[in-house]
Image (tube, helix red, strand yellow):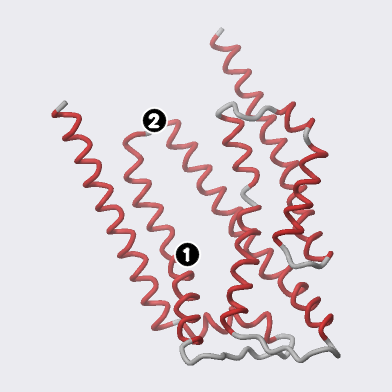
Amino acid sequence: MTDTKKAFLEHLSELRKVLIYCVISLLACFIIIFVLFCDELMDFVLAPIRQFGIDVVYTTLGEVWLTEMKVCFIAGFIAAFPAISFFFWRFLRPALYQNERKAFALIYFLSLLLFILGVCFAYFVVLALTINFFVTTGEGTAVPMLTISKYVEFLTSFIIPFGLVFLLPMVVLALTKVGVLQVSTLVKSRKYVIVILAILAAILTPPDVVSQLLLLIPMVILWEISILIAKRVERKKERSLVKTD
């Protein structure tokens, strides 16, 4: 009992160190970005709206400063994410077998890549079309006056869902590996899934058909890729069972 308690306290102490390292990494990246790259970062964030000749405004004295802090914090978290991941990986590594370490590392890097692809797709492709839709719709009715805080809020709430949606193949892969999902179930539920994905696309994007289609089409493609991944995982399971027998 004493050994178990001692081991628990050691793990708790190690976790505390990991959290401290993560916070230090996050604060260091945030401070560096805020001090050295804040202007360049804000130019990058505001570029999609400025290309339509619209300049953002602010309605309270601290709005610009607080928005810059928010943007730099998000950028700081992204910059610190590799270090944060490494610290947690080092904490979890002793508890994993060799094959589990390889699988975890592969899923991690593929998930990170897919999330980045989703964010880039949203920023460089979908965002401009969405802004164009709303600007065109409002022409002749009102003059656009966007506050900087509302624009950044719209940007983050618009882009992050795209990144999360692109993680669909990894979610299906994980659920198939643990036996929660089967290929037959995925294939049979295809038409229902497409309807659900269409509803999600309508919820996650602004109310225009172009944006919804630009999210729906990649989601359907990712779902089909997920089915192919699940088939491969199931075949590997069947082969391993045959070898065991």
Regarding mark 2 in the picture, which secondary structure is present there? loop
Single out the residue that lies furthest toward the top: 245
Looking at the image, residue 183 lies above or below residue 238: below
Kindly identify which residue carries mark 2: 97
The image position of residue 176, as x and y in percent, is: 61, 31
Q: Give 56 or 177, whichever is nearer the viewer.
A: 56
The image position of residue 185, as x and y in percent, is: 73, 28
Residue at left offset 55%, top offset 28%: 178
Residue at left offset 25%, top offset 53%: 17
Determine crowd level at label 2: few under 14, some 14-19, many 20+ residues with C-alpha closer than 10 A: few
Kindly identify which residue carries mark 1: 78
Regarding mark 1 in the picture, which secondary structure is present there? helix
Which three-letter amino acid code belongs to the residue tagged 2?
Tyr
Which three-letter amino acid code belongs to the residue tagged 1?
Ile
Residue at left offset 67%, top offset 32%: 230
Left or right, residue 35 beside residue 132: left
